[in-house]
Image (spheres, rainbow, N blue to C red):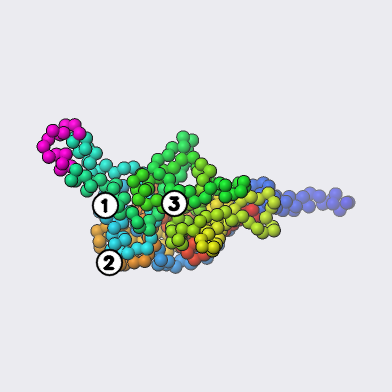
Amino acid sequence: MQAFARHWQRIAITLIPLILALMHALGVVHLGIVSRLDDIIYDARLLATMPRTLDDRIVIVDIDEKSLAEVGRWPWGRHKMAKLFDNLFEQQKIALLGIDVVFAEPDESSGLKQLQALAADDLKDQAGFSERLAQLESSLDYDRLFAKSLEGRPIVLGYYFTGDRGGRKSGVLPAPVMDSSALQGRQINASHWTGYGSNIEVLAKAAPKAGFFNVLPNPNDGMVRTLPMLAEFNKQYYESLALGMFRMMAGDPAVQPGFPQERMVPRSYVGLDSLQLQRDGRILAVPVTEGVATLIPFRGPGGPQGGSYAYISAADVLNGSVSAGQLKGKIVLLGTTAPGLLDLRVTPVGEAYPGVETHANVMSGLLDGKIMIKPDYG
């Protein structure tokens, strides 16, 4: 006791940081400096261990600056999108298409709506006008033309969730993949949203499979290190774009929650450590981390010159300059690297990283069974 009395300050200086670090690890207190140090170490390890190799199973069709210069400003007419999709499936014979953009508004660029208004009013007595318009209607309804190019094809549309106070909703959500009743009364730390921006009804009906493409930047430094796999809206759970694509390739297995079984898990913990994909009596466990998310398994620095995935200009696919069958059997993601379309992210491996490539990385990791996690109970 005398020794303790003499050296209590020295002992306290040693023990207090250890106690605080232990309390941080157990989730009792949150120390921002420790979290930041964790992120720095993780980023350094990520940069040192990235494979920097090409995954030739996945191709990114890029709405790049070249495409905007040749085809026109975005959004393009849906008749052009129909041709693009037809070329991908009929000329290129791709296996699967995921869309990292949303078609949230009707396309009225053909002038059909104005012509119908004229037929009903100013030109209703004009001989032959209504009859001729009826003949042209199918070719001028660009949304229905596009919908026909979606029907019956392995396509996963994209959409996004919002968290604004007004809870604005537009378009049609896909069917949820999991109900809150599957959680058996437990709470999970999934991202929660109050609104969404999804695809218009005619397109959503033609291609009912869709996945959200939201990212959740780290609140400490704004970097994107993870992608949510599930998101909660109105007590229903919806899947991400990458998970939706993976499930489509796997025969659309059911999604069930996977609760941790490890003895070291605190009794108070009620989160998930995996998503259980179940089909024909078989189960594939997809690990998840905090927020029902996955750490993005970055392959390289990103972009057309990054070497992780082949990038092909959407204009080249649209005008047919890509050799027929060059993309046969490929998984294709349609997205953009054009700075003006605002889908570039700050990540540990690049400050202007294409958002579409984050989804490609997760898809690649799912295909290889290499999904890294940092459990939120440890």
Crowding near the residue tagged with mark 1, few <14, some 14–19, many ≥20 C-alpha atoms within 10 Å:
some
Residue 211's label in the rendered image is 3
Pointer 2 residue: 323
Residue at 11% in and 37% down: 127
- Which residue is situated farthest in the left direction here? 127
Label 1: state its secondary structure. helix
Relative vertical location of residue 142 with respect to residue 48 in this rendering, above or below:
above
How far is the residue under mark 1 from the one under mark 2? 19 Å
Q: Are marks 1 and 3 in contact (CB under 8 Å)?
A: no
Residue 112, how many percent across, how many down? 22, 41
Residue at 29% in and 44% down: 107
Residue at 78% in and 52% down: 11
331 and 55: which is toward the camera:
331
Label 3: state its secondary structure. strand
Please name the amino acid that badge 3 sits on: Gly
Residue 2, how many percent across, how many down? 88, 51
How far is the residue under mark 1 from the one under mark 3? 23 Å
Label 2: state its secondary structure. loop
203 and 333: which is toward the camera:
203
Pointer 1 residue: 80
Closer to the chain start, of discs 3 and 2, is: 3
Res. 290 visible in picture: yes
Closer to the chain start, of discs 1 and 3, is: 1
Please name the amino acid that badge 1 sits on: Lys
Crowding near the residue tagged with mark 3, few <14, some 14–19, many ≥20 C-alpha atoms within 10 Å:
many
Q: Quadrant of the C terminus?
A: bottom right
Closer to the chain start, of discs 1 and 2, is: 1
| Residue stretch rendered in magenta on the structure | 120-133
Please name the amino acid that badge 2 sits on: Ser
